[in-house]
Image (spheres, coloured by chain):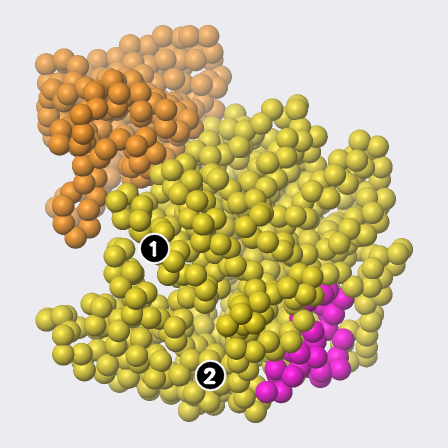
Chain colours: A yellow, B orange
């Protein structure tokens, strides 16, 4: 329940339902009966945050503890922020309406680099100093997690702790320690020293970073007994880890408003551009029975009429068809739709198509990522043009008339021929539609191509590669548009300025903290929103801080260079990434993990186990 | 298949969700209740659900109704109990009945408005009384002319059927009846915003108390 002062503000803002709380499934506890208050912050709007599966899982895991009350906090939209500041209302948590600054623990999910200014803004709106060194008390302690925690260095100044890996089983030790230190009245410094010894927790203030004359990192040196490397923590068995039996059901329409079920973690494919494909290794599958039971319970509890089976590559889930059989048994009579995002073109079978036809039809989306076979080989996207065509043919025979294809521009080794290849591939899909004798009468085909700009990320084989400059990307976009000769193909592009900034932070170091602070002080927030993004202010920020953003994006890094994230261990061996990089430059592919283990090293995180390995031995 | 009218209250923070959000909320609640809903036939089956008169966002109501079509032989009481157990906070199902009147018979609505945080509630009462007992009260309103949106001027006092004022503790309570329905509809917030100009520090909460026919009978 929101604080009373907010009552006056709600009629003045758009979508007041973002700020009221009280949704079905939200957890209300007696604040006097818990030992720790935890504000789980998502540094973006309510609609984005409420679509995020990780929050739903961790909210349930944290609240399963009797002594912890976890509440949700989202970034207020511009209009609400203005009213809150004008009326002196501090950032509050949705469940209790209590000010965030009075919580014991403030956790931020860092899902993408462009949310960084929102983190600062939320801390400030809470009435807290944004820099960790200026927050002297033990509580609230500010922790960051999520995908960007794999290189959190640009945000090192603002966080007390980063949590590396999967939160489900890391929470307990952290909560216990914080509870103990709070009860004993210990200092923040004592707590940070203790937490740095827990597996998977990184305390950035305990590491000194020195730089070479050319600006590259010389060394990352731990102090006060902090470990030299911090290893990502994982859960080993998805069937025996807690999954929510209730979701908070938003009133407002949010981006993903449905039951989402994670059926598998990790990905066998090893596409060289894909950070998630390496970051979430090793492969772990959930059993169809567990998924089926949990989906049923969630549908009953929420009333949702759609289930999304989510993973990095859903058609690689080995038991997809048996799972669909189980689900369709009750979802068809209950009129529940099943969505399968992240299907691959190369293993889209007839019987899978038939099962998909039983559920309500949505768009069909495939990601060839690159326009030519040579480049697809270089990025290890093991999909051939034949496979794309075969799938398109099946889709068109199945009655689809709209297909969406995902591509990237700016991939390493890309030439203008590869760019034109995107148009050629889309054209071939259009032609395939007209080759179908049973095509629906009077209906045309639409092939939408969504073209992102490639941003090299840590813990991928392309972590050493230069990123295309904005000028190069615009040139390639123009070339692609000129290569399209039909109105049946719609192309849309990502904004190159936004990809540029993402690239700076993705592989950035600690010195960038200054620029983030400067940009935020000069009004930057909601940077991932086209309307809010202000590249002029960011460029000014880099200038004012004496930083060259191209140093982070456009430079080819030497294999021997110390990378800002070298002290963080995500299980993937650097030598493996280097070998993959070298193969990319020779346009050589690496077979996926079930055909042959490529030896990435991630199975060491799971006691040597990897579901891909286990399955390849069986078959 | 039969049609039932579900009566409910919408009060508290949930008043900030829009009519569209309410429809989604209700669809999910009905699914949770396990009531055997009738679905439209055709390519994209969906449940049948219609609301008497959409409520503006921010308003509370004690007189909302929603007509749904159901299968099976559950009694109205059973349906009522099933729905009561699945509603989110702020939505309270009060009765399930056979529909009596078609929504087109709605002509007026009675509201009560609580003005909170007034500097001096009694002074605000007097000023409001003077304002509402005057000759006319012209306000600008965004209206439609064909498909175009145009600013229109309307005299609120022409539409105001009746009103009463009382001070209850620190709260000024205004009760009023205004035209409502598909023919003519006046949003009470137009009038309340004028009253706020008499005391800018105050804020108000509107509650729709009843929907009325042209003869001022309660819509059922």
| Residue B159, above or below A459 | above
**What residue is pinned by disc 2?**
A376
- Circles 2 and 1 on the same chain: yes
Task: Work out whether residue B197 can be spotted.
Answer: no
**Residue picked out by circle 1:** A325
Compared to residue B67, the image places residue A404 above or below, namely below
Nearest to the observer: residue A223 or residue B188:
A223
Q: Going 61% across and 78% down the picture, which residue do you hit? A: A598
Q: Residue at x 31, y 16 (%)?
A: B112
Of the image marks 2 and 1, the number of the one nearer the N terminus = 1
Residue A314 screen position, x and y as percent? 43, 63
Give the quadrant of residue B8: top left
Q: Distance between the residues labelled 2 and 1?
A: 33 Å
Q: Which chain's residue wears label 2?
A: A
Query: Magenta span has A384?
Result: no
Kindly state the secondary structure of the residue where label 1 is placed. helix
Using the image, determine if residue A386 lies above or below residue B185: below
- Please state which of residues A316 and B105 is positioned toward the viewer in this rendering: A316
Q: Position of residue A612 (x, y in %)?
A: 55, 68
Q: What element carries label 2?
A: helix
Q: Relative to A430, is B125 on the left or the right?
A: right
Judge whether residue A559 is colored magenta: yes
Chain name for mark 1: A
Residue A98 x, y percent position in the rendering: 60, 31
* Highlighted magenta segment, given as a residue range: A557-583
User: Dot 2, crowdedness within 10 Å: few (<14), some or many (≥20)?
Assistant: many
């Amino acid at each position: 329940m929101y604080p009373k002062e907010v009552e006056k503000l709600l009629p003045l803002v758009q979508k007041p339902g973002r700020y009221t709380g009280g949704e079905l499934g939200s957890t209300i506890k007696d604040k006097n009966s818990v030992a720790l208050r935890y504000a789980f912050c998502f540094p973006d709007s309510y609609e984005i945050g409420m679509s995020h599966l990780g929050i739903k899982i961790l909210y349930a895991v944290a609240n399963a503890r009797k002594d912890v009350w976890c509440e949700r906090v989202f970034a207020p939209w511009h209009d609400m922020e203005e009213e809150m500041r004008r009326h002196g209302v501090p950032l509050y948590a949705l469940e209790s309406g209590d000010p965030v600054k009075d919580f014991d623990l403030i956790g931020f999910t860092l899902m993408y680099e462009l949310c960084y200014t929102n983190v600062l803004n939320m801390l400030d709106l809470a009435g807290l100093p944004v820099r960790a060194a200026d927050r002297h008390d033990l509580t609230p302690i500010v922790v960051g997690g999520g995908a960007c925690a794999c290189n959190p260095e640009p945000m090192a100044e603002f966080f007390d702790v980063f949590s590396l890996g999967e939160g489900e089983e890391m929470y307990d030790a952290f909560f216990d320690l914080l509870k103990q230190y709070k009860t004993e009245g210990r200092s923040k410094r004592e707590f940070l020293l203790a937490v740095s010894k827990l597996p998977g927790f990184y305390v950035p203030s305990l590491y000194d970073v020195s730089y070479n004359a050319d600006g590259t990192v010389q060394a990352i040196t731990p102090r006060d007994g902090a470990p030299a490397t911090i290893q990502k923590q994982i859960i080993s068995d998805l069937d025996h880890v807690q999954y929510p039996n209730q979701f908070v059901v938003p009133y407002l329409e949010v981006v993903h408003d449905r039951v989402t079920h994670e059926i598998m973690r990790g990905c066998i494919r090893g596409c060289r551009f894909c950070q998630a494909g390496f970051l979430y290794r090793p492969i772990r599958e959930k059993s169809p029975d567990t998924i089926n039971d949990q989906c049923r319970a969630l549908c009953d509890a929420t009333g949702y009429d759609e289930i999304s089976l989510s993973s990095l590559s859903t058609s690689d889930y080995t038991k997809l068809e048996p799972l669909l059989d189980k689900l369709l048994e009750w979802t068809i009579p209950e009129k529940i739709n099943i969505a399968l995002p992240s299907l691959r073109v190369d293993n889209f079978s007839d019987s899978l198509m038939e099962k998909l036809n039983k559920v309500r039809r949505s768009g069909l989306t495939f990601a060839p990522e690159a326009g030519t076979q040579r480049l697809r080989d270089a990025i290890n996207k093991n999909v051939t043009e034949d496979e794309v065509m075969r799938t398109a043919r099946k889709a068109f025979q199945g009655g689809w008339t709209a297909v969406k294809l995902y591509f990237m521009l700016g991939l390493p080794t890309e030439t203008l021929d590869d760019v034109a290849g995107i148009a050629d591939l889309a054209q071939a899909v259009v032609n395939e539609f007209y080759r179908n004798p049973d095509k629906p009468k009077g209906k045309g085909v639409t092939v939408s191509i969504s073209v992102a700009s490639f941003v090299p990320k840590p813990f991928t084989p392309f972590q050493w590669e230069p990123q295309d400059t904005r000028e190069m990307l615009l040139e390639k976009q123009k070339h692609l548009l000129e290569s399209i000769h039909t109105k049946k193909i719609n192309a849309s592009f990502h904004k190159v300025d936004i990809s540029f900034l993402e690239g700076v932070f993705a592989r950035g170091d600690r010195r960038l903290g200054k620029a983030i602070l400067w940009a935020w002080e000069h009004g930057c927030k909601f940077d991932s929103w086209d309307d809010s993004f202000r590249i002029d202010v960011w460029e000014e920020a880099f200038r004012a801080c004496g930083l060259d953003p191209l140093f982070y994006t456009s430079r080819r890094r030497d294999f021997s260079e110390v990378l800002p994230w070298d002290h963080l261990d995500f299980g993937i061996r650097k030598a493996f990434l280097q070998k993959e990089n070298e193969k990319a430059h020779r346009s050589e592919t690496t077979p996926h993990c079930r055909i042959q283990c490529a030896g990435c090293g991630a199975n060491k995180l799971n006691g040597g186990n990897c579901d891909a390995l286990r399955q390849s031995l069986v078959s | 298949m039969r049609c039932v009218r579900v009566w409910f209250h919408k009060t508290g923070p949930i008043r900030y969700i829009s009519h569209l959000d309410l429809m989604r909320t209700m669809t999910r609640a009905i699914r949770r209740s396990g009531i055997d809903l009738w679905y439209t036939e055709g390519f994209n089956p969906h449940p049948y659900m219609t609301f008497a008169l959409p409520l503006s966002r921010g308003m509370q109501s004690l007189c909302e109704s929603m007509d749904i079509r159901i299968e099976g032989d559950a009694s109205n009481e059973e349906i009522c109990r099933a729905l009561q157990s699945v509603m989110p906070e702020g939505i309270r199902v009060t009765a399930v009945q056979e529909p009596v009147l078609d929504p087109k018979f709605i002509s007026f609505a009675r509201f009560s408005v609580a003005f909170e945080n007034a500097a001096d509630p009694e002074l605000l009462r007097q000023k409001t009384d003077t304002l509402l007992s005057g000759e006319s009260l012209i306000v600008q309103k965004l209206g439609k002319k064909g498909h175009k949106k145009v600013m229109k001027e309307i005299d609120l006092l022409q539409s105001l059927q009746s009103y009463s004022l009382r001070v209850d503790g620190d709260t000024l309570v205004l009760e009023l009846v205004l035209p409502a329905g598909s023919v003519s509809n006046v949003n009470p917030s137009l009038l309340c915003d004028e009253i706020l100009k008499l005391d800018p520090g105050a804020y108000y909460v509107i509650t729709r108390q009843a929907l009325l026919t042209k003869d001022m009978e309660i819509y059922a």
